[in-house]
Image (spheres, rainbow, N blue to C red):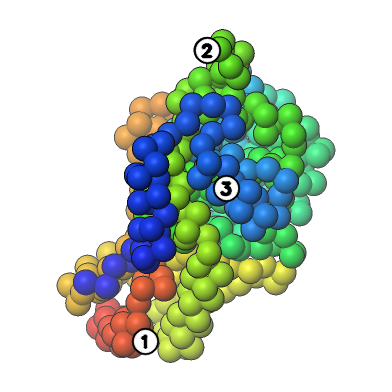
Amino acid sequence: MIPINRPLISEEERVEVMRVLHSGRLTDSSLEGGFMVKEFEKTFANFVGVKYAVAVNSGTSALLASLLSLNVGYGDEVLMPSFNFVATANAVLITGARPVFVDIDLNDYTIDIKDLERKINKRCKAVIPVHLYGHPANMDPIIELAREHDLVILEDAAQSLGASYKGRQTGAIGDLSCFSFYPTKVITSGEGGAITTDDEDLFVKLKMVRNHGIVSDYNSEVLGLNLRMPEIGAALIKAQMKRIKRFLEVRRKNAEMLSESLDGLQGIKLPREKESCVHNWYLYTIFVEKNRDEVLESLNKRGIGATAYYKIPVHRTHLYTRLGYGNISLPNTILASEHVLSLPVHPGITEQDLSVITSSIREVIKTNF
């Protein structure tokens, strides 16, 4: 099976992890965190192009810590797309706030600006644009609307590390931004995440939130939890950062090869970079005009780990249906959920793998059409 994504671990990662194991310092409950955590945060902030980064133990923790640092809670509403992984909405729900789901633009599967504007109300405190599949959301009009309505912008950059919008990295545009380092992501710490910001006050508060709200002497000053990244995870991703540019280069090369081979094939729509955007090619997502599930099944049977993200939009999951969201109108979201399919494009695949993927796609699409 050619997997949809897989981590690439080298000897350097092993050496860094062993350094932590030999030291015996597996974590650090101080406000600043351990040596490996601090080293990673400096490197990561520099790469993204921001003043500060705060490492945490998952992308979900990054979202929750950000919302807590912004005092989002009961009575507040937060705007976001439903066509996304459920963690973004769940983090809002846990704070006591209410997710407000917005439709998407089918050209890049990110938040639809017109629907966003329609759904802003006086209770809205924040907007979470999701850079889905690694393509940046259309940030300029989002920023304009946020300024007009006094909204905080919390970027969900879980899938978009290395992508950029008009020369700025995703993660360096909003008031706060959240990343995930799950093993399927561009780089990994096993489980892990990070928050980036240029706001010093938020930076200080985020460090407290990830550490039970404690600065010193076990005296909690704000509401927080244990959201710390362990030193082993920080060591692993610190080493991964040294290879991120190469990872991104190979992803782009693989995406270009897929596009070149599949260009002009009837029955599918290929992903494109919008003007002034740089895609990181976390996922190579095609739109299959009909019989998507049959196409997916046929590809899987041929050993290609194609996957449909997201067959069930968040508002249609059992949880959110019970909460009353099931019948809201998000036509583009439903259309995408029924037609998109993602193909392997990660640095671990070979040219031979790409050839197998494209020939299989051609054969399967021809059979289905």
**Residues at marks 2 and 3, CA–CA distance in whole angstroms:** 25 Å
Q: Position of residue 10 (x, y in %)?
A: 37, 66
Q: Residues within 10 Å of mark 1 (few under 14, many from 20)?
A: few
> Taking 11 as reference, is 76 left or right?
right
Considering every residue shown, the one lying at the far front of the view is 22
Residue 351 circle label: 1
> Mark 2 touching mark 1, by CB under 8 A?
no
- Label 3 sits on a secondary structure element that is helix
Q: Can residue 203 be seen in this view?
A: yes
Q: In this view, does 37 lie above or below 344?
A: above
- Label 1 sits on a secondary structure element that is helix
Q: In terms of sequence position, does the residue under pointer 2 or pointer 3 come before the other?
A: 3
Residue 39 circle label: 3
Q: In terms of sequence position, does the residue under pointer 2 or pointer 1 come before the other?
A: 2
Residue type (three-letter) at the residue carrying disc 1: Glu
Q: Which quarter of the figure has residue 77?
A: top right
The residue drawn where x is 35% and y is 82% is 350
- Label 2 sits on a secondary structure element that is loop
Q: In this view, does 246 lie above or below 182?
A: below
> Taking 314 as reference, is 212 left or right?
right
Q: Position of residue 148 (x, y in %)?
A: 82, 38
> Taking 124 as reference, is 270 left or right?
left
Q: Name the residue under label 2.
A: 218
Q: 364 or 31: nearer the eye?
A: 31
> Taking 367 as reference, is 111 left or right?
right
**Residues at marks 2 and 1, CA–CA distance in whole angstroms:** 55 Å
Q: Is residue 103 visible?
A: no
Q: How crowded is mark 2: few (under 14 residues within 10 Å), some or many (20 or more)?
A: few
Residue type (three-letter) at the residue carrying disc 3: Glu
Q: In terms of sequence position, does the residue under pointer 3 or pointer 1 come before the other?
A: 3
Residue type (three-letter) at the residue carrying disc 2: Tyr
